Image: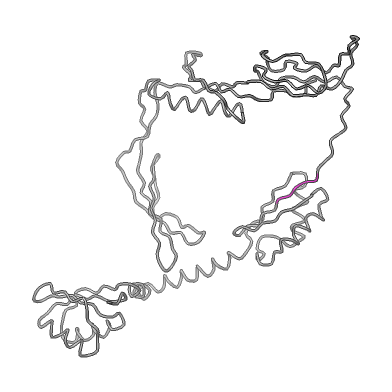
Amino acid sequence: MRPSVKTTLVLEGLNLKSALKMLVEKGCTVFDIKEHNKKKLSFSVLYIDYPKVVAYLTEKCYTVEKINHYGFAGVIDSIKKHWIAVAVLTVFLCVLAFFSTLCFDVVIDADSGVYEKVNQAINNAGVKKGIRLSQINIDEIENAVCVSVPEIKYAFVKISGSRVYVSVLLRDVSDEPVDYSKPVDIVAQKNGTITKILILAGTPAVKVGDEVTIGQVLIKGLITYKDGTTEPTTALGEVWATASETGSALFSPVVNKLVPTGSVTKRHCLKIGKYTSPFNKKIDYSYFETQESYAWLFPLGIKVIYQTVYEMRLDSISVTLNDCLTQLQAKAYADAVNKANFDFIKKTEYGTAEKNGNTYVTATIYADIKISINGG
């Protein structure tokens, strides 16, 4: 097997084969011999032998046109040529490794009513920016927060990267007692067609199949006895209906579209651990699109990100409703979903509408939901 750590030389002169024979007699391993013409050939030697090979050939007045190092030999040669950069990079990686053991930030997820108390408890426990992550005892911090803030039931501490995350769960607060003797109706919070009614207390004001509107009384806060007498109460129950919500998207006969100008810029940056350097070139394009690829520099563990930037310009083009109908329907559907917040949509209907001289594409979604809430 030929060595993978080798140096290839291109030699020019007379009696080239005699020169190779002398190298072998001096104990050098010569392989990959390739003759280009009578006065030029290339061959490979072990990387460790190449300095004395070059010195011997130079002494014998041969011309060494080219020297190429392969495998780990290339890495060693690059390190020798750029030792200052390698030394700086090594120091940088050591500093980066050191700082990765420190806490750079403490993130607290807590209600505004207890946030300051939790922050103070964390500080009192010694968790702050700059502390070594290895000094943080998660169980002790969680206990300290719970003891210092009585409103908290549980505290959760997590270390991720160079950040410490603290979240809390508040204790349950008992609801105020409900006075069921107060007359409270159940009303509709959305328009819809009634599909199901469940009454625990009160008198129904609608039936299945009725069309109701927002604010309409569904269950009256009133009990009616067989003798005709009544008694006020807090209505209890649920009313379900098929509700709908309509979203819309404005159609414009002129749309803006990005098209390439033909101008292209290529640039790159380096990523070392969590640090990413700035790109070597700035982009002055107003509009652009990018395409990225990357390569690793082994064994240094450096990621090189290559980015191709295509300049774009904004052009206005004329379109018909049919040209962009699918996109407008998707926008109208998203608008309806955002307004309704339905858990399950059972049907969608699309259409168009004219308003103030403008054309809108509409999407109406339907779902079976609970529409009842306590009213006055």
Q: Is residue 57 left or right of residue 189?
A: left
User: Considering depth in this image, is 34 or 281 the residue closer to the camera?
Assistant: 34
Q: Position of residue 360 (x, y in %)?
A: 48, 19
Quadrant position of the N terminus in the picture: bottom left
Establish if 349 lies above or below 105. above
User: Considering depth in this image, is 61 or 214 the residue closer to the camera?
Assistant: 214
> Which quarter of the picture shows residue 17?
bottom left
126 drawn magenta: no
> Among all residues in the image, which is located at the extreme left?
38
Question: Residue at point 59% right, 59% down?
Answer: 161
In terms of secondary structure, what is the magenta stretch mainly? strand
Quadrant position of the C terminus in the picture: top right
> Which quarter of the picture shows residue 8?
bottom left
Question: Residue at point 32% right, 46% down?
Answer: 264
The magenta region covers 167-171
169 drawn magenta: yes
Question: Residue at point 17% right, 84% down?
Answer: 20
Q: Position of residue 374 (x, y in %)?
A: 77, 23
Q: Position of residue 167 (x, y in %)?
A: 70, 50
Establish if 190 lies above or below 279. above
Q: Position of residue 85 (x, y in %)?
A: 41, 70
Q: Is residue 32 left or right of residue 204?
A: left
